[in-house]
Image (cartoon, rainbow, N blue to C red):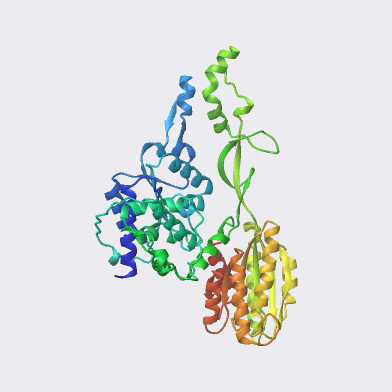
């Protein structure tokens, strides 16, 4: 059986278990739009019948219900309208990777309050760090990745599950396995226990509910259990020795597990390359209004204020004897907006070698072209050159075109390629930028032939290892990156470095300033 077929069967099994059991919250399905996801949604409709579709930009009123403002004002009495989350039991949320933390919290509260409700999240994220918010993932038992499933792997699957009774020993075994996998969630063992009752197989239950939550590889036991300890009691049909279960789970864990975890942690709270999201009361994307005071330049939200005041109009008119609209301080709602922080483009340029003069000329032109758009995009630009044995900050963060041209004119060239030093200096500048509220993005231009180690010695092997170590450090701090290969031929070592950085890799051996600027703009989606 191929890996794709096995993944599809696991998805169908999880769907069947979810349909037959309550209290599992739901599942996340990672899949791009296409025939495989269409086949999965057909299976969802077969299992659940009608489902309610949700969108990440839906308002609270649409989801949770609220006051029908027009009818309330016309009738003088409170009239409420129901929300979508109150109408059904099975919901499908599209584009889960775009779900805000606030929406995830509201959906989580609904799942916590009513165990019969189920939520299926369709996650279309292109990379592991583009994912559904963690506070919603925590409440969903299953997580299936269909990105590697082909249409040929899709098949009709029927299951005859053997429901079984579980004991305290089963729960202890599940908790021990979760501990070995580094699963800190208290919900995860409860989900695994429910899945065990539904399937009757501990290995299957652990695969469906625990493997995707793993934060570490299971450790090999130092000393095997003594024969007399394992013979103290007879195992029930559902019990399997822990070491066998862990061996099976260890084989299921992806090889890049630790890289995925690091990427997700780095992504949390950082936003995307266009600037980390932050709240503001003046500009940006509108957010739901909140109760507040008209101070510090806050703007009143008229609709939100009227909606808050409407239920009390009849009582207030009777108390005051005045037939007019009554607004109190407690009714005031103010507008909120989501703003984005300025971005810093850190150009780390390889200024080594005999071809540096031609290459640096194009880099200078590209930076000037990008800087000319900085005012519209609110971008800052910084320039780092690495050559000889060290890296040097030639241009601190700036939006000044005059200052940039002056510094670029004095950009030196020649010497060795201290790639690791360039990454180290770039990381320092990125961390300083974060402290100032900027969102750093690293753009590295090099031919990838590192030959100078961090200690300044000419050692190609050590230089390559130092570069990989620094790339891991850059990625662990959540710095988005772009690697541009300026060599005459694509360099395999540089492509591997880009993979370690979690960065896009662009081989542009003969790029002029306009192509270089266009490639950077397209890759950064600016």
The residue closer to the viewer here, 478 or 276, is 478
- At a point 59% along the width and 21% down the height, the residue shown is 326
Above-or-below relation of 415 to 200? below
- At a point 42% along the width and 50% down the height, the residue shown is 190
- At a point 67% along the width and 75% down the height, the residue shown is 422
- Tell me if 469 is positioned left or right of 49 in this view: right
The residue closer to the viewer here, 263 or 198, is 198
Q: Where is residue 127 in the image (x, y as percent from the top left)?
A: 48, 63
Q: Where is residue 389 in the image (x, y as percent from the top left)?
A: 71, 82
The residue closer to the viewer here, 350 or 133, is 133
Query: Quadrant where the C terminus lies?
Result: bottom right
Q: Where is residue 412 in the image (x, y as percent from the top left)?
A: 73, 80
- Tell me if 375 is positioned left or right of 122 in this view: right
Query: Quadrant where the N terminus lies?
Result: bottom left
- At a point 40% along the width and 64% down the height, the residue shown is 230
Residue 490, can we see it? no
Above-or-below relation of 343 to 89? below
Above-or-below relation of 217 to 53? below
């Amino acid at each position: 059986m191929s890996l794709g077929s096995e993944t599809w069967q696991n998805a169908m099994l999880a769907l069947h278990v979810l349909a037959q059991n309550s209290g599992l919250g739901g599942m996340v399905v990672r899949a791009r739009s296409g025939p495989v996801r269409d086949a999965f949604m057909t299976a969802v409709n077969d299992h659940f019948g009608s489902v309610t579709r949700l969108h990440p930009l839906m308002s609270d009123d649409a989801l949770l219900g609220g006051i029908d403002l027009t009818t309330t004002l016309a009738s003088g009495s409170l009239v409420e309208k129901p929300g979508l989350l109150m109408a059904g039991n099975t919901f499908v949320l599209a584009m889960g990777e775009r779900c805000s933390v606030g929406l995830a919290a509201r959906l989580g509260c609904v799942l916590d309050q009513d165990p019969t409700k189920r939520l299926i999240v369709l996650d279309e994220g292109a990379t592991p760090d583009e994912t559904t918010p963690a506070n919603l993932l925590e409440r969903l038992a299953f997580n299936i990745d269909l990105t590697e499933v082909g249409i040929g792997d899709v098949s009709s699957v029927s299951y005859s599950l053997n429901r079984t009774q579980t004991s305290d020993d089963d729960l202890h075994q599940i908790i021990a396995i979760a501990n070995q996998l580094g699963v800190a969630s208290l919900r995860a063992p409860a989900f695994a226990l429910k899945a065990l009752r539904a399937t009757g197989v501990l290995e299957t239950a652990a695969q469906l509910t625990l493997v995707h939550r793993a934060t570490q590889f299971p450790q090999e036991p130092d000393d095997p259990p003594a024969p007399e300890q394992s013979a103290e009691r007879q195992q029930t049909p559902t019990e399997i020795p822990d070491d066998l279960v862990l061996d099976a789970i260890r084989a299921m864990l992806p090889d890049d597990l630790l890289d995925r975890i690091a990427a997700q942690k780095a992504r949390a709270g950082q936003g995307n390359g266009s600037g980390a999201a932050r709240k503001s009361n003046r500009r940006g994307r509108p957010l739901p209004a909140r109760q507040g005071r008209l101070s510090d330049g806050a703007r009143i939200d008229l609709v939100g204020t009227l909606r808050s005041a409407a239920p009390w109009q009849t009582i207030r008119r009777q108390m005051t004897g005045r037939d007019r609209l009554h607004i109190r301080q407690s009714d005031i709602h103010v507008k909120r907006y989501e703003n984005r922080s300025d971005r810093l483009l850190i150009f780390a340029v390889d200024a080594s070698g005999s071809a540096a003069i031609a290459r640096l000329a194009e880099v200078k032109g590209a930076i000037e072209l990008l800087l000319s758009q900085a005012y519209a995009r609110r971008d800052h630009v910084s320039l780092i050159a690495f050559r000889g044995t060290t890296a040097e900050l030639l241009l601190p963060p700036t939006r000044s075109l005059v200052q940039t041209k002056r510094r670029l004119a004095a950009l030196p060239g020649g010497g060795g390629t201290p790639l690791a030093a360039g990454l180290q200096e770039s990381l320092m500048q990125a961390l300083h930028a974060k402290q100032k509220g900027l969102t750093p993005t690293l753009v590295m231009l090099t031919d990838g032939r590192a030959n100078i180690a961090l200690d300044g010695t000419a050692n190609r092997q050590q230089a390559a290892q130092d570069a990989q170590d620094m790339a891991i450090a850059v990625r662990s701090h959540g710095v988005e990156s772009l690697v541009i290969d300026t060599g005459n031929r694509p360099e395999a070592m540089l492509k591997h470095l880009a993979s370690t950085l979690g960065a896009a890799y662009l081989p542009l051996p003969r790029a002029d300033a306009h192509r270089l600027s266009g490639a950077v703009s397209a890759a950064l989606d600016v």
